[in-house]
Amino acid sequence: MDKLIITGGQPLGGEVRISGAKNSALPILAATLLASEPITICNLPHLHDITTMLELLRRMGVELTIDEKLSVEVDTSTIQETHAPYELVKTMRASILVLGPLLAHFGEAEVSLPGGCAIGSRPVDQHIRGLEAMGAEVLVEEGYIRARSNGRLKGAKIFFDMVTVTGTENILMAAALADGQSILENAAREPEVVDLAECLIAMGADITGHGTDTIVVNGVEKLHGCRYSVLPDRIETGTYLAAVAAAGGKIKVKDTRPDTLDAVLQKFREAGAEIETGPDWISLDMKGKRPKAVSITTAPYPAFPTDMQAQFAAINIVADGVGIIKETVFENRFMHMQEMIRMGADVTIDGNTAVVKGVEKLQGAPVMATDLRASASLVIAALVAEGDTTIDRIYHIDRGYECIEEKLQLLGASIRRVPG
Ligand code: UD1
């Protein structure tokens, strides 16, 4: 397994271009299963999770054509099966996103149950309940979700018990081809849900209210082809800003969407960063100062995202003061803290709350990445620490960060990958 070796202790500076959002690209690729004509998706990030989703589509018999600009044309007219096997789903939970589209377009789907994962049990009951409310027959047997519909799914009123991003996306996609009107209440408002809805609209869907907690979908009989460009990744954006907030220096992040990061930018300002924004860029300047500790509570959008929690932990461990971090979305998302403690961080964890007392210095150490965002936070901690940090199991980071070494090298970081 590859490792990253980072020599930290230097401020960073420069410009970074942000890639397309993984969490938009995955549902949008799944949504191509709804269309009766080829769809071209642009600005796809080059990530393992995207390759997994393309492989999933390919295994179903879908035809994929990649052009010279690395846009992918997806033609589902050649589909042969509606099955998502365990070996792919186990490597990427978001494979569950094919369930709604397969069922809505082809009347059947068999998708392996995603298991637990490092950050919690992550059930999919809301996805299943929503599809059942639309008239599907769903059986969970032999580790698979087997769903069927007798003719078209029926529009329905669906109230989600909790805000679920992929749950909302699965039901939104199914509703797009259902017979009649669906009303999704307590829907997720994440920018990636909005991006999916916009793509579906470009395919001919009738959707309103996306970006609010009530989405109204008037089902249509067919969805047509389109060309759609994926939204920039707000979490990748926040991660590079966090690296500079922790290590010191100045950065301009380009090809991004500042309006999707209000809660996060607010916290950078509280941490003492000077932030400026333009239509598609954000600059952050620490003005030579150590960051101030900030307290955060994660919650669904537009509140502070759970996917930025670990990166802010990495700022707080070297900040001036005490930051209190509350994780309300996932039950077990503090694994990075244990690794940071090995680098000299002062953290006390009590249930879903971590009290982080900033220390002046961290020391490099061998650490292990446990999940995607935890890996990113360890990279940030390593950039701050004195000496060398070796991060093991970095395959997690390749699931969500395109060219991370190259981008950090552009900012002046000393980072290299060694094959394990
Ligand atoms: C998505 C994101 C992930 C992000 C998360 C929260 C993708 C591919 N992934 O994950 O990066 O961290 O949103 O912003 O977009 N829940 C249930 N039952 C369900 C569904 C969810 O109990 O049927 C619970 C989960 O266990 C969790 C909470 O709801 O505690 C939110 O999870 P959810 O929004 O569904 O996360 P994902 O969509 O899997």
Image (cartoon, rainbow, N blue to C red):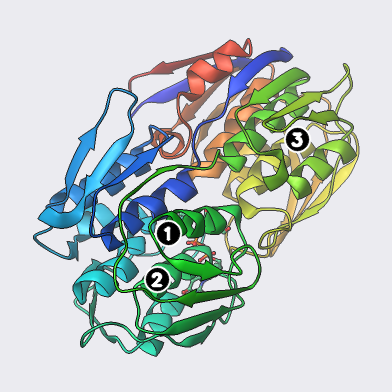
Earlier sequence position, callout 1 versus callout 2: 2
In front of the other: 109 or 72: 72
Asked if residue 122 can be seen in this view, the reply is no
Quarter containing the N terminus: top left
State the residue at coordinates (29%, 22%): 68
Measure how far apart labels 3 and 1 are at the Cα level.
Answer: 38 Å
Measure how far apart labels 1 and 2 are at the Cα level.
Answer: 8 Å
Asked where in the image residue 153 lies, by quadrant, the reply is bottom left
Q: Which residue is mark 1?
A: 200
Residue 363 against residue 165 in the figure, above or below: above
Q: Which residue is mark 2?
A: 176
Q: Amino acid at mark 1?
A: Leu
Badge 3 vs badge 1, beta-carbon distance below 8 Å: no
Where residue 269 appears, x then y in whole percent? 87, 37
Q: Secondary structure at mark 2?
A: helix
Query: Disc 3 vs disc 1: which is toward the camera?
Result: 1
Q: Few, some or many C-alpha atoms within 10 Å of disc 3 (few <14, some 14-19, many ≥20)?
A: many
- 393 left or right of 341 in image: left
